[in-house]
Amino acid sequence: MLEIIKYDENVHKSIWDNFVKSSNNGTIFHLREFLNYHQSRQFNDCSFIFKEKDKIQGLFSGAIVNNILHSHPGASFGGFVHNDLSFEISNQMIDMLITEAQNKKLNEIVIIPTPFVYYQNYHEVIEYCLYNKGFKDIEYYISSFVDLENNLIEQMHSRKKRYIKKFENQVKVKLSEDLDSFYPILIENKKKHNATPTHSLKELKLLIKKFPNQIKLLLTFKDDKVIGGALNFITNNHTCILFYNMIDYNYQNMQIASIQIYESLKWAKENNLRFFDIGVSQIYDNDLIIPHASLINFKEQFGSKTMIRKVMKLKL
């Protein structure tokens, strides 16, 4: 019989992380070591373990915000972590989660499912069961990824190849841990779009300290001056996400953003990864989410394909 167990940091941390690492769709964003790094935000964690005869069938990474159960707000996406599940077990897990939320008198459940490129073997049974239980898609984001099994040069647009070739010998891109040089560029880039970074400098330093083999910073130098940087997260053993790609706008005509993506793609391919997630592309206009057409086109010039990142909700 399937049972649901409330996650307890003092009891379940190693069990949780070990399951994430061996699961079909677990990522760095599901690890407790990652979810616990932002102590200053103090999320009201509400995560669950689903077990049958002492065997873990799945996890739900979540927190309560404004009387809503969210897949964990400290992560880019979340929801259920699992191996290959049967239809029956999937239904039971969702029913149990709904019952827990109802018992806590919560108003809604909001889930951002893990996109397919993060799966070892893509399996949509959980998403089907979510729809079948009444979950609705409330937001859609267009996201871009590159299949690293393809030839990077051959799939790149000819104009992009010319631009990179023209400027790549004028700069040097290399791995670095110099976040102090990168962060002011990150702040200026975000300020240009009336936004602030997701992470503080202190949080980024802590994350790199916790995950030195999974979070890699590529810095771009013009002579000895840092003029840009790309921060990549190796999320699991086959997929990497470009979390920040920032440039000093005094050098934007040198195609720094393009060079950094190209160098990140090469680095990911050299490290035997399968997919490279270049992220979402949208503009916010009041309550509307509008596709950022020029940014999508920019990513497509690297041979990227489109996937949907979505948000699902159930009103209780």
Image: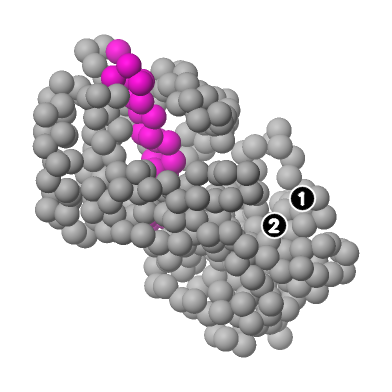
Vertically, is 40 above or below 282?
above
Quadrant occupied by the C terminus: bottom right
Evaluate if marks 1 and 2 touch, with contact meaning CB atoms under 8 Å apart.
yes
Q: Three-letter amino acid code at disc 1? A: Val
Q: Which label number is shown at residue 176?
A: none
Is residue 81 rendered magenta in the image? no
- Judged from this view, the residue extending furthest toward the top is 224
Read off the magenta span.
225-251
Q: Name the residue carrying label 2.
A: 70
Identify whether 201 is placed above or below 83: above
Residue type highlighted by circle 2 = His
- Could you tell me residue 31's position as x and y percent? 56, 52
CA neighbours of label 1 inside 10 A, class few (<14), some (14 to 19), many (20+): some
Please give left or right for residue 307 compared with residue 166 in the image.
right
Indicate the quadrant containing the N terminus: top left, top right, bottom left or bottom right.
bottom right
Q: Pointer 1: what residue?
A: 65
* Residue 293 x, y percent position in the rendering: 38, 48
Q: Residue 52 or 237: which is nearer the viewer?
A: 237
As helix, strand or loop, the secondary structure at mark 1 comes to: strand
